[in-house]
Amino acid sequence: MARVRLNETSDLPEEHRWLFERLERHDGDVINIFRALSHSPVALRRFIKLGSYFLEEGKLDPQLRELAILRVGRECGAPYKVAQHIALARRAGLTDAQVRGVEAPHAGLYDRRQLAVLTYAGELTAHARASDAAYGAVSSFLNAEELVELTLVIGYYNMVARALNALEVDIDTQARRDLETVGG
């Protein structure tokens, strides 16, 4: 059970209810992370804006982005983050085996670029820095804009995973089904 109330639209101050109403129109439902973070509605709005940029407008290949996010979720022990991105990973063309394999990636499941991203994300998450080898591997195929975006995605989703863990946000129903399907 979440450590903070998972707010409904009616729980928000009147001037911030539009945010949930917009999410309901766009996605059909307000997911639990947004319901938990809505206790700080101005921060939530900015949080959504940056996350939406990465997911909808970013320059990074969606498969590479999702692998990085899944690796962060696994490294941080954040099942909510992993569960929530399984559908996005599938939509990007990743297999369930690749989703499962992010914790201990190997060449049998991933190509050289994917392995490089998984290594870079894993090192940044575990040590708050990347080795020269990990940086060199991703910089061999990403341009400067993509490399900075990858680094920001990893940092952003580390923040997300840690907030989810601290607040013990409950996994949404569909995301839980996805997690069970892939064996997470």
Image: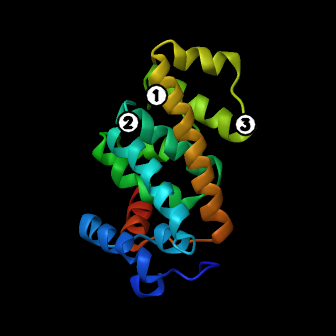
Q: Specify few, some or many for label 2: CA neighbours under 10 Å numbering under 14, 14-19, or 20 or more.
A: some
| Residue that lies at the very extreme toward the bottom in this rendered image | 10
Vertical side of 68 occupied by 163: above or below: below
Relative to 22, say whether 57 is above or below.
above
Q: Residue at x 46, y 28 (%)?
A: 114
Name the residue that disc number 1 marks.
114
Q: Earlier in the sequence, mark 2 or mark 1?
A: 2
- Coordinates of residue 43 in the picture (x, y in percent): 55, 62
Looking at the image, which is closer to me, 109 or 119?
Answer: 119
Residue 58 circle label: 2
- Tag 3 or tag 2, which sits nearer the N-term? 2
Query: Is residue 17 at all visible to an observer of this figure?
Result: yes
The residue type indicated by label 3 comes to Ala
What distance separates the C-alpha of mark 1 from that of mark 3? 20 Å
Packing grade of label 3 (10 A; few <14, some 14-19, many >=20) is: few
Q: Earlier in the sequence, mark 1 or mark 3?
A: 1
